[in-house]
Amino acid sequence: AKPIIAIVGRPNVGKSTIFNRIIGDRLAIVEDKPGVTRDRLYGKGVWLEQEFNIIDTGGIEIDGEDEILRSVRVQAELAIEEADVIIFMVDAKAGVTATDEEISEILYKSGKPVVLAVNKVDNIQRQDDIYEFYTLGFGDPVGISGAHGLGIGDLLDEASKHF
Ligand code: GDP
Ligand code: MG
């Protein structure tokens, strides 16, 4: 079976933007269950001739901190079950948030390999913004920009080490 990458993170960090850049037009399945926070998109990717499947978690965006927390928790747990490697995405502009720390706890306990992706590093000046994310405890963060398509090769290099 092809390896599976899941992208996990709180709403608005840029998961769908990166997912779309990685899959191009290779969207496979849209799992849509109205009323639950399980909406997930499945796509196909290829990196250095290795094919993989990738999951964009969190199709539903909900208002309110409690709802967001609950939904990211559910998504993280589903992703952990399915994935061989998890891309944990955070937002350089926002910095480390309480929700990021909550997700970190879930990911720690999973024991699955995690690659920490700091999105919205839109230019070289912002590269310094990634260092505060070391505190999350997943080692070297990979700075990326979905908006500008930067760092995505480096991210897939790191993720594919765990295939
Ligand atoms: P998701 O909720 O995690 O799936 O995030 P989205 O992919 O929907 O992106 C949330 C918002 O962040 C959108 O307005 C995107 O245009 C914006 N965004 C995504 N990637 C970047 C980036 O690299 N830089 C900047 N500045 N904005 C981005
Ligand atoms: Mg999204």
Image: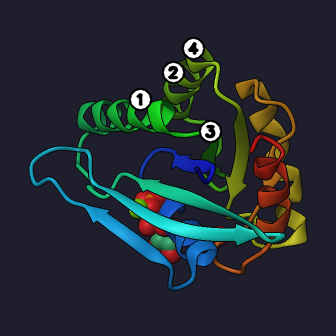
Q: Quadrant of ligand 2?
A: bottom left
Disc with the residue nearer the chain's start (2 vs 3): 3
Q: Is residue 66 above or below residue 144?
A: above
Mark nearer the viewer, 3 or 1: 3
Looking at the image, which is closer to me, 112 or 16?
112
Q: Earlier in the sequence, mark 4 or mark 3?
A: 3
- At x 75%, y 37%, the residue is 133
Q: Which residue is mark 4?
A: 109
Query: Which residue, given by chain and number where applicable, does mark 3 sit on?
Result: 84
**Disc 4 secondary structure class:** helix
Which of marks 1 and 4 precedes in the sequence? 1
How far apart marks 4 and 3 lie (CA) works out to 15 Å
Near-viewer residue (2 or 102): 2
Residue in the picture at 33% in, 32% down: 74
Quadrant of the image occupied by residue 163: top right
User: Are the residues tagged 1 and 2 within 8 Å (C-beta)?
Assistant: yes
Q: Gap in Å between the C-alphas at discs 2 and 3?
A: 15 Å
Instruction: Measure how far apart labels 3 and 1 are at the Cα level.
Output: 13 Å
Residue on which the image places disc 2? 106
**Residue beneath disc 1:** 77
Q: Secondary structure at mark 3?
A: loop
Report x, y in % for residue 59.
31, 58
Mark 1–mark 2 Cα distance, whole angstroms, equals: 7 Å
